[in-house]
Image (cartoon, rainbow, N blue to C red):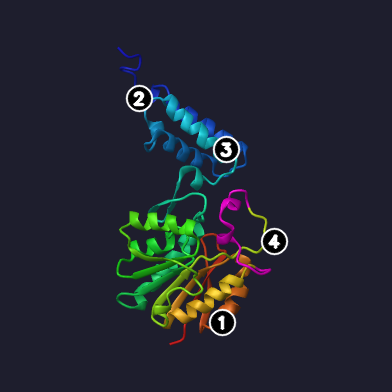
Amino acid sequence: MSALAGMPPDSRPRSTWQAVMRQVAEQLAAAGIDSSAAEARLLVADAAGVEQPWLSPVPPTPAQLARLSHTTAARLERQPIQHVLGKMWFRYLELAAGPGVFSVRPETEAMVDAALAALPQLGEHPRVVDLCSGSGAIAIAIATEYPRAAVSAAEISPAAYGYAQRNNASYGNSVDLVLGDARTAFPQLLGTVDLVISNPPYVPPTDELPPEVRHDPQLALFGGGSDGLDLPAQLISRAAQLLRPGGVLFMEHAPEQAAKIVAIAARDFEKCETGRDLTGRERWLRADKAN
């Protein structure tokens, strides 16, 4: 009979997976990774191939430990967790990720919340355009959460576009996705779009970036000009061309860019304001086109 038989569950030895997970979390914390506990759980679940393996009494196999050693080493080199796992999460989506595509951030989810809240006031079947789509996260989130919308998206990077295609296919190809320059995309839609949304490159050239962020494509990070707002300014103008009277633009920006980007948008839009993320920072522009 097993030595564990008849023992109360609370008195049984802790799973070997739990000990391994603690060790990984300690290594990540020692490397200065703030979310070490959460990331250790992700790495362990990836190695095990199941959710919450630490709840199982079955110990890890040598192959699983080898996988975990490899992924932990990559994370300790400050490769983004999204690249290490080959996937990332955005709202209700699980998306393919890796080198060549921008890793989504939580603050962008708050901007999508604001955009979704605006859609019911923009018509029965609003037309939405996502500029600088990257992985397709924003466009696919809107298309799946608000299926009455007709969503199109443009991405200029062939590598990122490949990820967007994969992600779009995973969710029923719900987005009209094109490879092209967001500054000239969708000429056939000029003056007909209800909502434009964008998380464009906006990082100034002098910003010091965390090690993980430096793995994102430069094309997806730096917005041009001394303040990082050259490309955002061009996209604001393009959005004004695409939007119908009464249409709305949402665009992510850095907190310190709020006043400048509002001033830029005021050239083409009637009402401009910035939205705040959960920490109270000004993180996106809302601009309404005059009727």
Q: CA distance from mark 4 to mark 1?
A: 26 Å
Q: CA distance from mark 2 to mark 3?
A: 30 Å
Q: Residues within 10 Å of mark 4 (few under 14, many from 20)?
A: few
Amino acid type for the residue under numbered disc 3: Leu
Residue identified by numbered label 4: 206
| Residue that badge 1 annotates | 266
106 in relation to 5, above or below: below
**Residue, disc 3:** 28
Asked if disc 2 and disc 3 are in contact, CB closer than 8 Å, the reply is no
The kind of residue tagged 4 is: Thr
Displayed quadrant of residue 12 = top left
Label 2 sits on residue: 9
Between 154 and 202, the one nearer to me in the picture: 154
The mark lying in front, picked from 4 and 1, is 4
Of residues 123 and 178, the one nearer the viewer is 178
Counting residues from the start of the chain, the first of labels 3 and 1 encountered is 3
Looking at the image, tell me whether mark 2 or mark 3 is earlier in sequence order: 2
> What amino acid is labelled 1 in the image?
Ala
The image quarter in which residue 8 lies: top left
Could you tell whether 136 is left or right of 32 in the image? left
Q: Which callout, 2 or 4, points to the residue nearer the camera?
A: 4
Q: Looking at numbered disc 2 in the image, what kind of residue is underneath it?
A: Pro
